[in-house]
Image (spheres, rainbow, N blue to C red):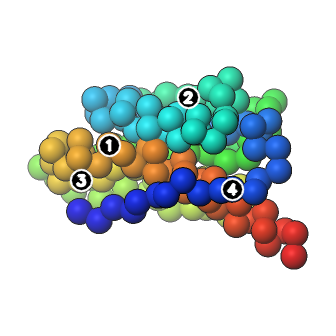
Amino acid sequence: MATHSFDKKIFKIPELEQRYFGIVYSEWNSHVTEKLLEGAKKAFAEYGISEKKLIISCVPGAYEVPLMVSHIIKASYIPVSGVVALGCVIKGETNHDEYINHAVAQKLMDLSLQNHIPITYGMVTTLNEAQALARANKGYEAAISLLYLLDSMNKIARI
């Protein structure tokens, strides 16, 4: 299994602690998604972002994640600097997982590009439950990736 080791990075994001962020997670496979959520919250906390600055929303399944991400970006009275999308799809007897995974990934990318806002992909897509549990750190990694991307975007904006 490929993993990325995130060393504690120094991000130069103006007023980071004052910004708001969204986290959308699915309830389906909650024994995995709750760990994803805890990891994302831990990553934000490590960079001084309190839970009060997180707009956290739970949806039934992975397929519903993009709609709630869109709602947080467009309908929230609080502007967010980015959104972490979390969910877990485990392959079953049919190919439904492939359709769900493709649709969710494509729509999240579309939303990110259309709204010019970072949306990171913390969706665990595996063949079995053991693999899903082994990848439950992806919530942490998705939140760090969001901060990393914001930092990179900020650097380009200052050039």
- Residue occupying the point 21% across, 56% down: 95
Percent x, y of residue 19: 77, 39
Percent x, y of residue 114: 71, 61
Q: Is residue 18 above or below residue 154?
A: above
**Are discs 1 and 4 less than 8 Å apart at CB?**
no
Q: N-terminal of the two: label 2 or label 1?
A: 2
Left or right: 29, with 156 as reference point:
left
Single out the mark in the foreground, 3 or 4.
4
Secondary structure under tag 2 reads strand
Q: Is residue 74 visible?
A: no
Percent x, y of residue 116: 74, 60
Outermost residue, left side:
93
Distance (Cα) linking label 3 and label 2: 23 Å
Q: Which residue is mark 1?
A: 136
Percent x, y of residue 68: 58, 37
Q: Which residue is mark 2?
A: 57
Mark 2 crowdedness (10 Å alpha carbons): few <14, some 14-19, many ≥20: some
- In the rendered structure, which amino acid carries the disc numbered 3? Thr
Q: N-terminal of the two: label 1 or label 4?
A: 4
Q: N-terminal of the two: label 3 or label 4?
A: 4
Outermost residue, right side:
158
- Please state, as top left, top right, bottom left or bottom right, where the N terminus lies in the image: bottom left
Single out the mark in the foreground, 1 or 3.
1
Q: Which residue is mark 3?
A: 126
